[in-house]
Image (cartoon, rainbow, N blue to C red):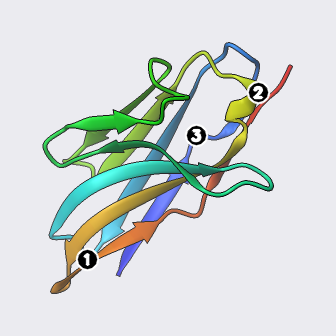
Amino acid sequence: QVQLVESGGGLAHPGGSLRLSCAASGNIFRIYAMAWYRQAPGKQRELVARITSDGNTNYAGSVKGRFTISRDNAKNTVYLQMNSLKPEDTAVYFCNIDVQGGGYRAAYWGQGTQVTVSS
């Protein structure tokens, strides 16, 4: 089994910054893609950013140029640096990690962390 622990959410003012972290632990042989999703009240969960095992990244258009996804393979951790935050970035943010371990491959979700952008 694999566990994901997220941290770093909270309250930020418009124009401010936050950094999210998601650390994976447990029966891990290899980690493939790592990603961040978010879900605002009354809306569907959407992909924010994704990073492959090779370090290739892609972003939702609404965050491109403001958010940066990165990973530390030695720590099995993915980060999301969020700058120039806007009120519309308010949502619960979830990490999603594609893991090979225990003889099978599966995608795991973090518990979610609240990000609120408000003046």
Q: Which mark is residue 43?
A: none
Question: Image height check: is 40 above or below 83?
Answer: below
Disc with the residue nearer the chain's start (3 vs 2): 3
Q: Position of residue 58 (x, y in %)?
A: 33, 36
Q: Residue at x 55, y 19 (%)?
A: 83
Q: Label 2 vs label 1: CA separation?
A: 38 Å
Q: Position of residue 82 (x, y in %)?
A: 53, 26
Q: Label 3 vs label 2: CA separation?
A: 17 Å
In the picture, which quadrant includes the N terminus? bottom left
Q: Position of residue 25 (x, y in %)?
A: 34, 66
Marks 2, 1: nearer the viewer? 2
Q: Which mark is residue 27?
A: 1
Q: Residue at x 19, y 73 (%)?
A: 100
Dot 1 falls on a residue whose secondary structure is loop
- Residue for badge 3: 8
Question: Who is closer to the viewer here, 43 or 31?
Answer: 43
Q: Tell me which amino acid carries mark 1.
A: Asn
Direction front: furthest residue: 61
- Residue for badge 2: 87
Q: Tell me which amino acid carries mark 2.
A: Pro
Disc with the residue nearer the chain's start (1 vs 3): 3
